[in-house]
Amino acid sequence: MSLEKTESLVLRTVDWSETSRISTLWTKKFGKIRALAKGGRRLKSSFENALDLLTHCSIVLLRKTSGSLDLLTEAQVLHGFSGLRKDLNALHASYYLAELLSEWTEDYDPNPVIFEQALLALATWSDLGDGKVCAGREERQGRIAAVLFRFEFILLLELGFRPELKMCTGCSGEVDEFQNVFSPAGGGVKCRTCSLADRTSFKISSESLQVLISLEGVSMENLQIIPLQIRKELRKIFGRYITYLMGRRPKLLTYLEAGCI
Ligand SMILES: [Zn+2]
């Protein structure tokens, strides 16, 4: 057993006994872990609000070696992201982020890029919810969506599922500029011929494809607002691709679709 200090993001917390809770945390040092917080259910516990969903905290862990759960001995809030609760789209986007990290990443597989980008996305959504960035409802919705698409793109890259967006994933040939097709099973675009036998494939507009290509190189801070029609298409592309890769449809997708983000 060893004591370890790291930063973490709370993805999920369930009650375990009369007084304890088990938290799923995405930590900077160890990736996703599950840890037992003894006394975590007491009103005046030493964890205060540090185990609330999507809280960024500094923690101390007692690492167990024999397959049993790590023990959380300390947790202090660094950022509560309170603005997330003030905008429904921001809240849904952040719950979706938590769902992807919780359900789609392996335990003990650290990734500093994912950790840093998740915090950046949550901070941006929280600021939008708080009204810190001057934005009307439409603009806010467009910004929330752009940050979410960028995060999904980064997650795909980091998990080894970079979508191929230039040449056909079936035959490596050129794709028709005016008849773009995306294939979740192929992991990217397909030419018309190859897409015929692929039941997962669907048509996408060249405008959406261009925005998708641009998402790879842009930083979160420099994202442009994406028009509504393209957002709907990108949601379909990311939603279907991630559903295919995860083997099930993320629960929060329905809410994202309803909010056009
Ligand atoms: Zn082809």
Image: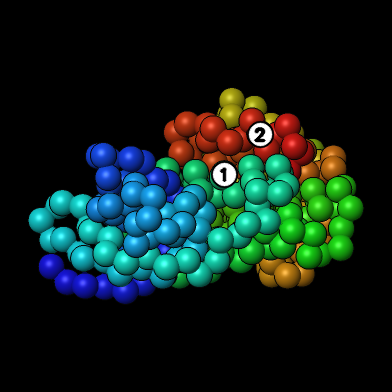
Residue 33 visible in the current orientation: yes
Q: Can residue 111 be seen in this view?
A: no
* Residue at the limit of the structure toward the front, as seen here: 44
Mark earlier in primary sequence (2, 1): 1
Label 1: how many residues lie within 10 Å, few (<14), some (14-19) or many (20+)?
some
Tag 2 and tag 1, C-beta contact below 8 Å: yes
Q: Which amino acid does label 1 sit on?
A: Tyr
Q: Report whether 72 appears left or right of 174.
A: left
Task: Give the quarter of the figure containing the C terminus.
Answer: top right
Check residue 139 in the rendering and tell me which mark sits there, or answer none.
Answer: none
- Quadrant holding the N terminus: bottom left
Q: How far apart are marks 2 and 1 (CA)?
A: 9 Å
Q: Residue 109's x, y, as percent? A: 34, 60
Q: What residue appears at the point 36 percent right and 41 percent down from the top-left corner?
A: 14
Which residue position holds label 1?
Answer: 96
Out of 88 and 144, give the one closest to the viewer. Answer: 88
Q: Which of 114 and 82 is in front in this view?
A: 82
* Residue under numbered circle 2: 255
Q: Quadrant of residue 131?
A: bottom right
Q: Is residue 45 left or right of residue 149?
A: left
Tag 2 secondary structure: helix
Three-letter amino acid code at disc 2?
Tyr
